[in-house]
Amino acid sequence: MWQDNTNAQYATAGGSQGQYYASQPGVPLQFYAPSPVGNSFYNPGRSSLEGSVQGSMMNGGQTGGVGPGYGGNIQSQGGWWTAFGTGGLEGEPPLLEELGINFSHIRSKSMTVLNPLRTVDERIMDDADLAGPLLFIICFGTFLLFSGKPQFGYIYGVGLLGSASIYTLLNLMSEKGIDAYRVASVLGYCLLPMVGVGALSVMVTLDGMLGYMLSLLSILWCTYSASGIFVAVLRMSEQRFLVAYPVGLLYGCFALLSVFNVGVGGSGSAK
């Protein structure tokens, strides 16, 4: 009996609610009222999103493209070769500069060596690098190889031993001191006149009076340039001849390698 009364009450309530919702066809629930698109609390940016989607569809149907607000700073300025120059992405340094290879610095230091009579800037080795010295050493060994003197091992051995010796002497003679990286950089850049002698050895035979004179001139040139740079960087006064003596001995070894052909047994023989 009581179940029949309860079902009747639910039926009466459901019928009254159905009559209420039937009287308001646009409202699915009593507590919910739809708002215009873009003004809803749950979808505040719907209108702008639909507008951008519609605009991209009108421009060719590419909905995955980057909007105008994000494509201004990431567009490339050229092809893959821009990584090796000054172009590329905005604010991004060239790839070779990140690797420590700066052709403008190599050119300026090379011109300092080729013109030793001008005043040397004492801050020339603040940006010391080994890109130029490695390039000159490889060229020197390649020229000697073309002239029939495969002496890469002797070049690397003499260069390493000489750089360590000059580094020790300079730190004993100066109060300021210098690191081994800058010593190797200076000695490598000042090898440039000797590279020219190595290039001449491909065309002419240096085992003669002409070769001896050219080798002596290159030794004096390399020694004068290297001692001038060391004295300017270390601010050493009246010690240039003391610095030039061991440096000249080092470049004299390179001159001997360019004039004579060192055999397998270690004995020097004329070409």
Image (spheres, rainbow, N blue to C red):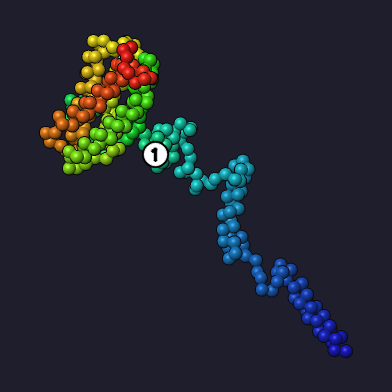
Q: Nearer the viewer, residue 236 or 77?
A: 236
Q: Nearer the viewer, residue 110 or 253?
A: 253
Note whether residue 171 is visible: yes
Q: Element at badge 1?
A: helix
As drawn, 88 above or below 221: below
**Residue 7, how many percent across, how many down?**
84, 83
Note whether residue 108 is visible: no
- Answer left or right for 132 relative to 171: right
Residue at (57, 50) in percent of width and height: 52
- Dot 1 corresponds to which residue? 98
- Quarter of the image containing the N terminus? bottom right
**Residue 211, how many percent across, how many down?**
26, 13
Residue most extreme to the left: 238
Residue most extreme to the bottom: 1
- Quarter of the image containing the C terminus? top left
Q: Nearer the viewer, residue 107 or 8?
A: 107
- Answer left or right for 77 relative to 174: right
The picture quadrant where one finds residue 102 is top left
As drawn, 98 above or below 142: below
**Residue 118, how many percent across, how many down?**
18, 27
- Answer left or right for 269 relative to 75: left
As drawn, 15 above or below 255: below
As drawn, 51 above or below 78: below
Residue at (33, 29) in percent of width and height: 157
Q: Nearer the viewer, residue 258 or 47?
A: 258
The kind of residue tagged 1 is: Glu
**Residue 137, how many percent across, how many down?**
34, 26
Residue at (50, 47) in percent of width and height: 70
